[in-house]
Every structure is written in C-alpha cells, then in structure tokens.
Image (cartoon, rainbow, N blue to C red):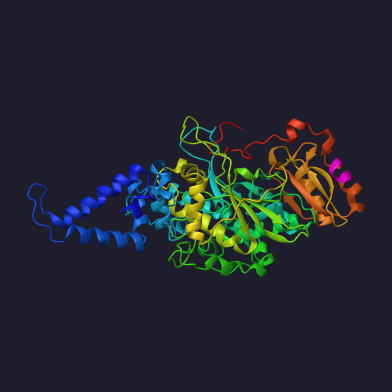
C-alpha cells in the first residue's frame, strides 16, 4: 500500500512489495508449481494488510527489516530515505528491533557478566598478577585498564593497572586531591596524569591494591564508575569558573547529565565495598538533588526509552554499543572542542541571565582506525534547541537511539557519529523525536565561537581569582628541580583550594583570594614551576597520551 511504500526508498519499496507478495503466496499456494484456489480473497487480504500496517508499528518493523535489519546490528546498510515522512503519515514509533541473530563475543560477555560482575568478581582474588581478557573488558566499566610494558619482551607480563577518576566538569575538591596524591605515592608509580576529558589517572597500581584505591575514592564522595567502558563517560564542561549565570548553569548541568546516565548496577559496591554503602554519596549527585535526577532517569513515556530491565533502565544488560561522550559549554566558549562529542550541549539564557534551554548537537568524535577508510573523525551536527524542562528526556532519547540502533557488529563503527552520518542529521532528528515524543525546535543563533585555554590569572566575577596552571602533557610529577606534584599538594594544604582539570591536560586553581596571589606565585617558583610567560606557546597547546606504559593504541611514548 502507498501508505507504507511512501516511507521508503524505491529499492526498499520494491523489497516491501516482494514481502507482501510472498506473504500472499503463502496464504494462497502450497507449491510454486501447483497453484490452488486461494483460501482468502486477494482483495480482503490486501485490506487486512493495509489496516495492520496503518494502525500498528509493523510498518516500521518492515522498514528495519528491509534495510538489512541494520539499526541494531550494522549502520552500513541503513537507508536514510526510509525515514522520510509522507503527506499522510509520520514516524511516531521507534523502529522495532529485527529478529535475534548471533551477537559478537563482547556483546555476549556483557550479557553474561550479570551487570558487570563476572568474571571480574572472582578473578580479583586469585594469586595471578593479572586478569583474563574477559575480566579486563568488564574491569573497564569500573574505571580501570590492565597494562604492561610493551617494550619488555617475553611471555611473562608485568601487569599493572591504570585507574581513571570520574570528575564531572573536571572538578577536583581539595580533599580528593590529597587522597589521590597519597594513593599514587603508596599504591601507584608516584605521579598523576591529567587527561583531555578533565579527569586524573593513577598509574602503576598492582592488582592487590585496586580494591583499596577504588574503595577509598568511592568513600570520599568520588568515583571511577563509568570512567571507561560502553557507557556515558566523564561529562566535560568549559573549565572557566566564572561566577555568571551561563557558566554556572554549564557546570550545574554537567553534573545533572553525569548523574542521569550513571550505571545503576550494584556490582561496584559489591566488588569494591563488599556490598556496603559508600561512606559519602557522590558529591555531584548531592549538588543536583533539586533536579530530581533519579525520577527523571526512570520516567517512562512508553516510547521505548526505558527498558524492561530490573537493574539498568537505560542501559539494559548490553549497555551501549561503544563509549558515549557529552560536553557542555556556553555560547562563544569552545575551550573543550564541543563539536567532538557524541552530544554537545550549549546553555541558552535570556537577556536577564535566566536559563531558557539548550542548543544540542550530535554525532561528533575524533577517533579513527589507521588504513580503514570506513572510520573517520567527524564534527557534530546541529540538532536543534531543547527547552530546559525537556533536556533530560531529550538526552535520554538520543542515548536510546544509539543504544537500539548503533552498530554492535563492527566495533570500529559503533560510535554514534556513524549512525548520524549514515542517516543524516534530519533523519537522525526524526529518530530521536520518535523516542522523545516532541518536535525538536530550530537551533538558536549564537555568537561566534572562540578558543581559550584559560591559562594565567583571571577574575572570577565574585571578587576572587582563578589561575590557569600549564602542565606539560598532563604529567603531574616531581623530577629534579621540577616539583609540580609537591607544589600542588602544598597549594592544597596551605590554601585549601579547589581545582578544575582543563581539556588541554592542564589545571585551573579557583576561588583564590587576591591577597594570596603573590604567595601562590612564590610557592610555584620555589618548586621550579615556570610562570605562564615563560612557557613555549607550542608546548602550551601540545597534547600526548598521558601514559607509560603506553595505551594499547599509542604508537610510541
């Protein structure tokens, strides 16, 4: 019927037509060479099919089936034309999943892990210095990577573990810095590494020390949960701590989104805290209690966002096809490269500084695989404007679209940018709207983007200062006369100052009393830290893998 085929490309429509005729043939024939009289009048059969397709979401299931059942398995065979609206209908239900098929080993591992428990839970207590590949995959969701020095040849591996913190908006309270400084000295290799996603890593932890380190971090009100794995990663934000409404909204909603998309499995407390509750709840969760994030997370509109799963209402037992990254900023401030995120969110306020909503972009990402042309870096597309009261539900809809229709077969093409690229932004917006239940409003014009790394001295806007401290390639260490790690500890102990990690692997020290400026400059100089004026501009913007041993994707140290 035209009601159905008007949704499809010519090729897909031809396939639908074949399916209809095949279904009809099943009803009226027992053999292709021995036709018999139809048991159902053809006109009646066609009418039945027409009304089924018109009033039930079977038509949408047929779209998914005829485009290679690709939305949950492979974006390579998607037909963007399948999303075009006809004059008589609109896509108002989510695409149904195709029939079950054999899934990849990694996807099977997620399911069999019992929400990120196995086989990690048992292997942590063996006498082996490392863990199996399967346990390692699950360990990533807990915030850790197993590493070894690849320059040491031989069968015996010197396994050690890297632990990555979760720091929404890059914030680092003084108590947390003291803790990780101590942990890195006692259980790590003595240094800290700042990443480009505004969080610290501790390297060189032995397997026997993991539980002590992770439990200590959890009990102080921080976390490593979701720092790695196929879930929403650390939510980035412009690092500038200006005391203006737009910047404060950006920081606030970075924490809202971090809390909204946190994994809910009790595996973390079971493994690292022996099932006990944390001594202090995650600080950012307490700071955004007024937003009723838990209620917003589990709210079910009946449009396919919430899964019928007893533990993970948003992630299910397979979590996402790949990692998922969110960034938040204000108009004009592109200090975090907002277009490189799966979701970029820009605060929109009125002339009085009141929050109206957010411009939302989707489909960014810098990753690619060498010599594989099917992978590529991609800047995000403008999806549109979302009012403040709808932003959590809209972001849930975007995540659900990637969860259900991202590529779970080919991991190199599993990021959401490939889904957006294949469908095109208009069709992807239609898919999101089918979960969201509302139209996405047009993108609001903003002032021109500018880049600033926010290094050096700045006025916050509340009478206090912040100082952007350059760190070469994120290496917080003591080496000869250069004693950055000791300098930061002295700053925290003397002034009890909070810090923010920046997207350039550097650091911002905030809430500085102007009378302490000279003392801070003297302290840094005593520890061999150059003032910003003496930092080579090339070094100031240089970045590198913060790792030795190198990450598995690194080419060299």
Instruction: Name the one closer to the observer, 457 or 184.
Output: 457
Q: Nearer the viewer, residue 546 or 132?
A: 546
Identified at 51% across, 47% down, the residue is 426
Image quarter where the N terminus lies is bottom left
Residue 127 visible, this orientation: no
- Percent position (x, y) of residue 112? 39, 57
**In which quadrant of the rendered view does residue 484 lie?**
top right
Query: What count of labels does the image hold?
Result: 0
Where does residue 444 sit, x and y in percent of width and height? Answer: 66, 51
Q: Quick one: 40 or 285, which is closer to the camera?
A: 40
Q: Is residue 545 above or below residue 308?
A: above
Does the rendering let one see residue 188?
yes
Q: Measured from the top left, where is residue 264 in percent x and y?
A: 52, 63
**491 lies left or right of 220:** right
The part of the image, by quadrant, that contains residue 494 is bottom right
In what quadrant of the picture does the C terminus appear? top right
Q: Residue 219: image x %, image y %?
A: 64, 63
Report the span colored magenta: 521-525
Instruction: Give the prevailing secondary structure in the magenta stretch.
Output: helix
| Residue 409 shown in magenta | no
Tell me which residue sits at (48%, 48%) in the image.
427
- Would you place residue 97 above or below residue 455 in this image? below
Q: Is residue 44 above or below residue 499?
A: below
């Amino acid at each position: 019927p035209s009601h159905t085929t008007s949704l499809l490309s010519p090729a897909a429509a031809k396939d639908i037509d074949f399916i209809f005729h095949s279904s009809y043939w099943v009803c009226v024939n027992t053999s292709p060479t021995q036709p018999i009289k139809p048991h159902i009048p053809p006109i009646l059969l066609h009418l039945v099919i027409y009304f089924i397709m018109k009033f039930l979401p079977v038509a949408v299931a047929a779209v998914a089936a005829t485009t290679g059942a690709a939305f949950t398995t492979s974006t390579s065979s998607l037909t963007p034309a399948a999303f075009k609206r006809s004059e008589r209908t609109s896509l108002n239900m989510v695409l149904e999943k195709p029939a079950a098929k054999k899934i990849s080993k990694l996807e099977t591992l997620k399911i069999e892990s019992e929400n990120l428990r196995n086989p990690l839970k048992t292997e942590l207590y063996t006498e082996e210095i490392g863990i199996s590949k399967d346990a390692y995959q699950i360990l990533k969701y807990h915030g850790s990577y197993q590493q070894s020095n690849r320059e040491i040849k031989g069968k015996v591996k010197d396994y050690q573990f890297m632990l990555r913190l979760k720091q929404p908006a890059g914030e680092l309270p003084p108590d947390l810095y003291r803790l990780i400084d101590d942990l890195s000295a006692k259980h790590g290799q003595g240094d800290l590494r700042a990443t480009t996603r505004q969080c610290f890593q501790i390297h060189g932890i032995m397997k026997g020390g993991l539980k002590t380190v992770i439990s200590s971090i959890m009990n102080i009100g921080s976390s490593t949960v979701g720092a790695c794995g196929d879930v929403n990663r650390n939510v980035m934000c412009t690092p500038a701590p200006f005391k203006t409404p737009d910047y404060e909204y950006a920081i606030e909603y970075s924490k809202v989104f971090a809390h909204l998309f946190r994994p809910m499995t009790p595996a973390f407390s079971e493994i690292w805290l022996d099932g006990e509750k944390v001594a202090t709840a995650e600080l950012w969760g307490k700071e955004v209690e007024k937003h009723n994030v838990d209620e917003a997370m589990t709210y079910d509109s009946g449009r396919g966002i919430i899964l019928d799963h007893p533990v993970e209402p948003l992630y299910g037992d397979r979590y996402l096809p790949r990692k998922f990254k969110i960034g938040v900023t204000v108009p004009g401030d592109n200090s975090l490269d907002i277009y490189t995120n799966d979701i970029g969110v820009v605060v929109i306020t009125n002339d009085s500084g009141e929050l109206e909503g957010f411009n939302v972009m989707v489909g960014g990402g810098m990753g690619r695989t060498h010599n594989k042309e099917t992978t590529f870096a991609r800047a995000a597309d403008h999806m549109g404007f979302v009012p403040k009261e709808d932003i959590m539900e809209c972001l849930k809809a975007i995540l659900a679209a990637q969860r259900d229709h991202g590529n779970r077969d080919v991991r190199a093409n599993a990021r959401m940018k490939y889904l957006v690229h294949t469908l095109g932004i208009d069709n992807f917006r239609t898919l999101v709207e089918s979960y969201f239940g509302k139209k996405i409003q047009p993108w609001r014009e903003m002032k021109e983007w500018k880049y600033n790394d926010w290094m050096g001295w700045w006025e916050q806007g509340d009478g206090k200062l912040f100082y952007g401290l350059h760190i070469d390639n994120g290496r917080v260490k003591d080496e000869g006369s250069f004693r950055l790690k000791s300098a930061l500890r002295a700053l925290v102990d003397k002034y009890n100052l909070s810090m923010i990690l920046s997207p350039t692997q550097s650091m911002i020290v905030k809430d500085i009393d102007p009378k302490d400026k000279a003392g801070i400059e003297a302290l840094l100089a005593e520890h061999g830290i150059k003032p910003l004026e003496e930092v080579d501009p090339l070094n100031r913007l240089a970045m590198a893998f913060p790792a030795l041993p190198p990450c598995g994707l690194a080419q060299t140290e």
